[in-house]
Image (cartoon, helix red, strand yellow):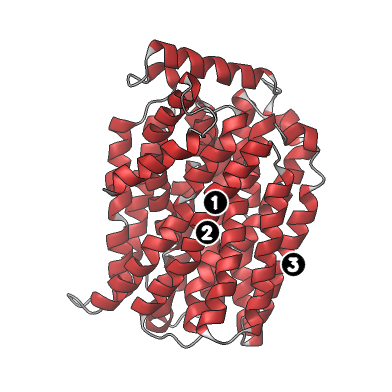
């Protein structure tokens, strides 16, 4: 039933009321049904294994006597490994094919994620978080690159919005699931609930990593589920789209391009907000007076439910209007307002409303951002460029939890950390307007 609902939603998104009867619309709906739900499941597993440390924190810090600063550094050090290996990973994927490389990524991180059961000291915690970043490096930008093999720029924002819905889905599923595991499995066979959390939530990634080998195709040519006419249409549209971009640009020349650094700076600010939300949301909820991990998990699902409504609506609007900058900047400003207002509130209900606004805005921004760099890059420059932007920007994933954790220890409150995140998001929204509209509004 869930699979049918997911594929029906994808079909509706790709086939608008204007062209539902056209061959092209039906073809893209078919591609969407085939690829997007499965890739969403894979990214859901990735995101769950990346951020479940935020739930483990509720028990782990007391058991291991870790400070907020130790947790913040450990949560963020994941992104140092990610930073070092992301660009090489995306280039290898482009050369060797998506199927085997994405499977390798998923299987590796599943094993490392389960290994967190052995954490006893800050050093082991840091090492495993770093290795998890190394293992996962290249997955998200690899999928973004993979979608450019199938969808032209005019249809890409919608595809990316649907794919990035896996992030709020991870919150909707992962919050209650994580809370339940920690509540129900505490002291089962003598193991703490947070250890069961890491072991059990690694299993979906393990199974999906194997499934990739049998399900994904490396590109249009190898897709046996498409007719020759459908393949020709998809190939023609992608080639036409790539002809409008700069091709065969060397990595060195691209790194010298100011657009790379502008886009990296914008996404850096988005990521600051994204991981300010995911790594600290359980703590924010608990500080309103909710003690039971099960109820913390249930309440953290609400902001992600709001985000999952916002993502496809904003993505469809961006494609319909062929406008990219406002559809990125406005959600960022809305999110910043949610983060800035949150410290002023004390009640559970009001806090959930504000954090829901912040979640909807920042997660919509995460998906809308990628319509910018993918609109101007093609070929190998896209492989290196997408990975480079994501790579440098994801360093914010290190700084965000580390700085917020330090500020929380320093002040004894979450106020300073949340205001810091809000200011960073506003700065990113301002930088969006330095991107020329003519290069992305198509």
Instruction: Locate residue 78, reporting x and y percent.
Output: 51, 58
What residue lies at 41% left-to-right and 64% top-to-bottom?
52
Q: Position of residue 131 (x, y in %)?
A: 45, 54
Vertical arrangement, residue 218 with respect to residue 63, above or below = above
Indicate the secondary structure of the residue bearing disc 2: helix
Disc 2 to disc 3, how far (Cα)? 21 Å
First along the sequence among labels 2 and 3: 2
Q: Identify the residue at horizontal 27%, vertical 68% (top origin).
A: 196
Neighbor class of circle 1 (other Cα within 10 Å; few <14, some 14-19, many 20+) is: many
Relative depth, front residue between 384 and 24: 24
Q: Around disc 3, counting alpha carbons within 10 Å, would you say few (fewer than 14), some (14 to 19), or many (20 or more)?
A: some
Q: Which mark is residue 307?
A: 2
Q: Which residue is mark 1?
A: 311
CB-based contact (under 8 Å), mark 1 and mark 2? yes
The tag earlier along the polypeptide, 1 or 3, is 1
Secondary structure beneath dot 3 equals helix
Q: Quadrant of residue 436?
A: top right
Q: CA distance from mark 1 to mark 2?
A: 6 Å
Residue beneath disc 3: 423
Circle 1 or circle 3, nearest the eye: 1
Report whether 238 appears left or right of 3. right
Residue 240, quarter of the rendered image:
top right
């Amino acid at each position: 039933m869930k699979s049918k609902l997911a594929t029906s939603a994808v079909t509706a998104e790709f086939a608008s009321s204007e062209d539902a009867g056209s061959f092209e619309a039906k073809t893209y709906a078919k591609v969407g049904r085939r690829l997007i739900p499965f890739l969403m499941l894979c990214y859901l597993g990735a995101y769950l294994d990346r951020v479940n440390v935020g739930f483990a924190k509720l028990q782990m810090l007391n058991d291991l006597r870790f400070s907020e600063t130790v947790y913040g550094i450990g949560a963020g050090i994941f992104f140092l490994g990610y930073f070092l290996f992301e660009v090489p990973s995306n280039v290898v994927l482009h050369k060797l094919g998506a199927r085997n490389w994405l499977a390798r990524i998923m299987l590796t991180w599943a094993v490392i994620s389960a290994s967190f059961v052995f954490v006893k000291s800050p050093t082991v915690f840091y090492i495993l978080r770093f290795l998890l970043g190394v293992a996962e490096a290249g997955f998200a930008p690899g999928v973004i690159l993979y979608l450019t093999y199938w969808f032209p720029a005019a249809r890409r924002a919608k595809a990316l919005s649907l794919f990035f819905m896996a992030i709020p889905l991870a919150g909707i599923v992962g919050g209650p699931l994580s809370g339940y595991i920690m509540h129900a499995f505490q002291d089962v066979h003598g193991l703490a609930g947070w250890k069961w959390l890491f072991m059990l939530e690694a299993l979906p990634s393990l199974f999906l990593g194997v499934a990739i080998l049998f399900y994904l195709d490396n590109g249009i040519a190898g897709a046996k589920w498409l007719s020759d006419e459908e393949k020709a249409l998809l190939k023609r549209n992608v080639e036409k789209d790539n002809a409008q971009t700069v091709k065969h640009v060397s990595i060195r020349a691209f790194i010298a391009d100011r657009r790379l650094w502008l886009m990296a700076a914008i996404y850096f600010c988005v990521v600051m907000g994204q991981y300010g939300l995911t790594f600290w949301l359980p703590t924010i909820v608990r500080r309103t007076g909710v003690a039971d991990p099960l109820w913390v998990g249930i309440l953290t699902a609400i902001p992600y439910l709001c985000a999952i409504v916002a993502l496809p609506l904003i993505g469809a609007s961006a494609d319909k209007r062929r406008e990219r900058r406002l559809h990125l900047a406005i959600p960022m400003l809305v999110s910043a307002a949610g983060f800035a207002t949150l410290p002023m509130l004390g009640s559970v209900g009001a806090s959930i409303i504000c954090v829901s606004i912040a979640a909807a805005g920042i997660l919509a921004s995460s998906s809308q951002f990628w319509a910018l760099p993918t609109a101007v890059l093609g070929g190998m420059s896209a492989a290196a460029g997408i990975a480079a932007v994501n790579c440098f920007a994801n360093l914010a994933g290190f700084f965000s939890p580390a700085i917020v954790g330090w500020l929380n220890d320093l002040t004894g409150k979450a106020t300073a950390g949340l205001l810091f995140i809000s200011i960073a998001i506003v700065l990113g929204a301002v930088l969006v307007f330095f991107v020329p509209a003519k290069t992305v509004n198509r």
